[in-house]
Image: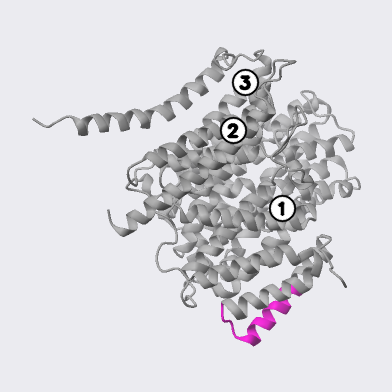
Amino acid sequence: MTDASLAARRRDQGGALLCLAVAGYGAWAGLGWGLRDDLTGEPGSGLFPFLAALGLGALALVLLARPGLAPDEEAEGDGPPNRRRVAGYVVALLAYALLLEPLGHLLVTALVLSFVMLGLEFVRPRTAIAITAGAVLFSWLLFERLLQVPLPRGPF
Amino acid sequence: MEVLAQLAAGFEVALTPTYLLLCLVGVAVGTAVGVLPGLGPTATISLLLPVTLAIDRTGAIIMLAGIYYGAMYGGSITSILVRIPGEAASIVTCLDGYEMARRGRASVALGMSAFGSFIAGIVATLGIAAVGPALATHALAFGPVERASLILLGLVLVVSVAQGSRLKAYMMVFAGLLLSSVGIDLVSGTERFTYGSPYLQDGFNIAVLAMGLFGISELLLLAERRQAQAEPLAYSSRLRDLLPTRQDWRASAGPIGRGSVLGFLLGLLPGGGAVIASFASYVVERRLAREPERFGKGAIEGLAGPESANNAAAQSAFVPLLCLGLPSNAVMGVVLGALMLHGVTPGPRLMETHPELFWGVIASMLVGNLMLVVLNVPLVGVFVAMLRVPAGILAPLVVLFCGIGAYSLNNNATDVLAMMGFGLLGYALRKGGFDPAPLLLAFVLGRMFEPLLRQGLILGYGDPMVFLESPLSASFLAGTALLVLWPLAAWLVRLARRRTPVR
């Protein structure tokens, strides 16, 4: 086995174990809600999640036991990854979601766009500022004024 | 001949200046909401319901119908350009449409999507006029038992749209089904996987999942791969160079024809609709293709078929609504509300009591589809120009519009957080070689499947054999079993041959 296929194998095993854990929890929760309503004899609330979890768990076991990779399998994004930029995007995405209501749409949009363009994409500062201002203005006009979407205003 | 005369009368209604204007407003608004992720046709039509009270009933339904099928086309634009499905029915368009764009063929994909939708619109309109009302009554033969079996078949077919391992695709289907059970169980009121959170009581929104699993995960993968500012792809600005070539047309003619018919028929079924139609068409084209391995890598057939199917289904979904009073999806449910607001009770007698409404709406669909082509084909160059924007600028703008789109669903920042979470999940899945498309499609189907499965079991007094008693249901189950067991049998035969020593 090459290093790449060994790594892929380990990735599969990790994925299978995670799915197995999710399936185990889903099946346990399904059993808790009941597979059948004892009073009416009708299918219970837990039947569907239980069956779905059972299927997921069984297939995760097959994946775990499988000796190697199928010939057509490949993960996306293989190659030298730019982990710093991915981490930066994750931070930006989470910051956008978490700060949207406390800071308001205008401020959080300006902050996140500036951070991504200047800190991660190395866009020239003048261009980044112009695009940020344009995007903030356009999104406010389109969503808040035209489509009447009540975007969060924050402390202002 | 009588049908043709009625259709001609319908055109007289649809071509009056007021209705033409309302149709134009409908398709333009529909295209815009289709492009904007999150704000789908259901929300838009609901928002516009009070506005329709100022218009007469025929005009109101013409405008609302225009929004619906306009959104079907608009949803494909972002699917092709940035891999964000504006609409659930455009999820399948992401698979090959986006790959075409990555290979510098975005304009061809957009053009074929517009023309395919237009042709499907014509087929669906003629189909509705000729056989729609008669077929709609047959659709009543599809009770919960038959529909549950049909969706089960659909769940197995979902695996065919996946890239890579079949085993992992089946795992994603089960994961999607499990995810679809999050929220309050509508039969018993039990809260499932909600952990006391009011946000989770309604389950996850399809748009949140679609934007996260497809759009945000793609953004992260692109961020990972880009080492330097990539050169934007070169595109011609001449409209003639942007449109599909003769070879593209030859490859797409069959898929458009088959997609139109398939979409028309599936749109008639209660619970069918544009989502199932689009991926059923994809599966059919992939199975019929001489080189199925091209699918998922920019095959024009994988775009033309589903795009035609979702548009045809969007139109034929009006038949069960108008002829039987049965809304086949959430959008039709809102349109039903609009009809009732205007004092119209849809049903088998609608064609006799309000012929101008029925035939006017049907004829307006043909006019509306023509408007979509006239509006959108000249704009193909403008849409494609988006791809000339450097990735370092486009990516943060995608984050912004996805964020606002998710927020606008319920005016709730938790939707934004959930979308980001699904983005990270999609990224992890794709890094692990798991295609998120089956998960998303199974989630959409799972929400329909569970209530139907339970209704079927209730009808059979808890006995699962009820699904084999109906011939229609039994044939769907036989198809499902064949699709599951055939590859398994082939694998076992291969294994046995490998173990047999060669003499």
Q: Residues within 10 Å of mark 2 (few under 14, many from 20)?
A: many
* SS label for mark 1: helix
Q: Is residue B84 visible?
A: no
Q: Residues within 10 Å of mark 3 (few under 14, many from 20)?
A: many
Q: Which mark is residue A27?
A: 2
* SS label for mark 3: helix
Separation of disc 2 and disc 1 at Cα? Answer: 42 Å
Q: Does label 3 or label 1 sit earlier along the sequence? A: 1
Question: What residue range appears in magenta?
Answer: A121-137
Specify the subunit that label 2 lies on: A
Specify the subunit that label 3 lies on: B
Residue at coordinates 34% horizontally, 47% vertically from top-left?
A69
Provide the residue designation for mark 3: B145
Same subunit, labels 2 and 3: the answer reads: no
Q: Residues within 10 Å of mark 1 (few under 14, many from 20)?
A: many
Separation of disc 3 and disc 1 at Cα? Answer: 34 Å
Looking at the rendering, in which quadrant would you find the C terminus of chain B? Answer: top left
**Image x and y of residue B431, in percent:** 47, 56
Residue at coordinates 52% horizontally, 29% vertically from top-left?
B153
Q: Is residue B278 above or below residue B154?
A: below
